[in-house]
Image (tube, rainbow, N blue to C red):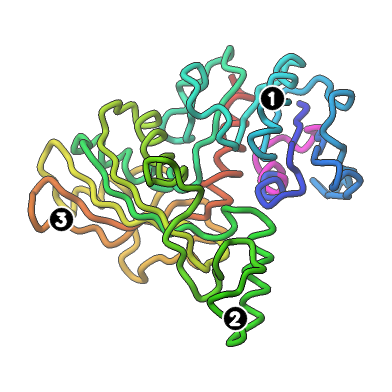
Amino acid sequence: MKIAIIGATGLVGRKIINLSEEYFPKDTSYTFFASSKSKGTELVINKNKLIVQELIDKNISEFDIALFSAGGDRSKGFAKKFIEHGAYVIDNSSAFRHDDEVPLVVYGINEKTINSNTKLIANPNCTTMGLVMALKPLHDKFNLKSITPVAYQAVSGSGTQAVESLSREIEMGDNLKEDYADGFYPRPIAKNVIPVAGNLLENGYSDEEMKFVNESRKILSIEDLIVEPSNARVGVKTGHGTFCSAVFENEVSRESAIDAINNFDGIEYWDDPLPTPLDAEGRDNVLASRMREGLSSKKILNFWVVSDNLLKGAALNAVQIGKYVSEL
């Protein structure tokens, strides 16, 4: 089997490399691609040193699977070229998520929407991914009608430069002022919360918030799901957390909800300790907690989820899908 990893030098790309060692056969042949700035970088997989190639047309050959984590523009420019060379393409960007012909897949929820003819598969947004892992078993149990998620997104969701900026700001300590303007974000992120994640749209919501709306509906196959989202960026390196208030058609119970989550692969419920981004970092599973029945209705559940946005939120899901298509 031949696998291409596009964006191999990035945060998600490096996670994909590590996970590939676990999920794919040891005799798999790999080729790493990145931008012209990163070509020539040496990376290791299965104790073999490989030189990163520049992502250009002449370097593309036949592959069985291509795992993309290089941004939407590169996905739009190169995904179909890899498909023409026989590859299944699994894309981590937002480039194809809203295409009706492209399945938006969370492994463990809807991977069966993929068949041998499905050559292009989209990976959802990392914040949406963590939340739907909790919503799916609850929907199956109680029939979901609406959600109000409030997400606290870590800086690694913005890439390497954002992580480096956070580190510099932390080192500044008390010298970091509110008018600091040399960071990755418009305002300081260390010791801070910025009340928007992503870019603001004409409707006043951010593109990150609208991903909750569109992607949750598509993944869960609930076209009329009501979604009222809010997202903030927080001074945390890794681990997206979301509080969610969910309304169901049927009456709910805390005990049944926790039982449904604990019997669903890929998520686990914690009571003590309460899970934080530090707990989620490096874990494959999504962590859920603080399950409460609504105060105003017997059809409401309020809860918290947190997950490693670089793992299940991106790299792990892509590799799980890759393994799935390799066995079709």
Residue at figure coordinates x 34%, y 55% from the top left: 150
Residue at image coords 56%, 70%: 188
User: Quick check: 54 above or below 76?
Assistant: below
Helix, strand or loop at label 2? It is loop
Whole-angstrom CA distance, mark 2 to mark 1, is 42 Å
Nearer the observer, disc 3 or disc 2?
2
Q: Quadrant of the N terminus?
A: top right
The x, y position of residue 298, in whole percent, is 8, 49
**Dot 1 corresponds to which residue?**
79
Crowding at dot 2, Cα within 10 Å, few <14 / some 14-19 / many 20+, comes out as some
Q: Which mark is residue 176?
A: 2
* Residue marked by disc 3: 293
Residue range highlighted in magenta: 17-29
Helix or strand or loop: what does disc 3 sit on?
strand
User: How far from the left and from the top, in percent, is residue 124?
Assistant: 50, 37
Q: Nearer the viewer, mark 1 or mark 3?
A: 1
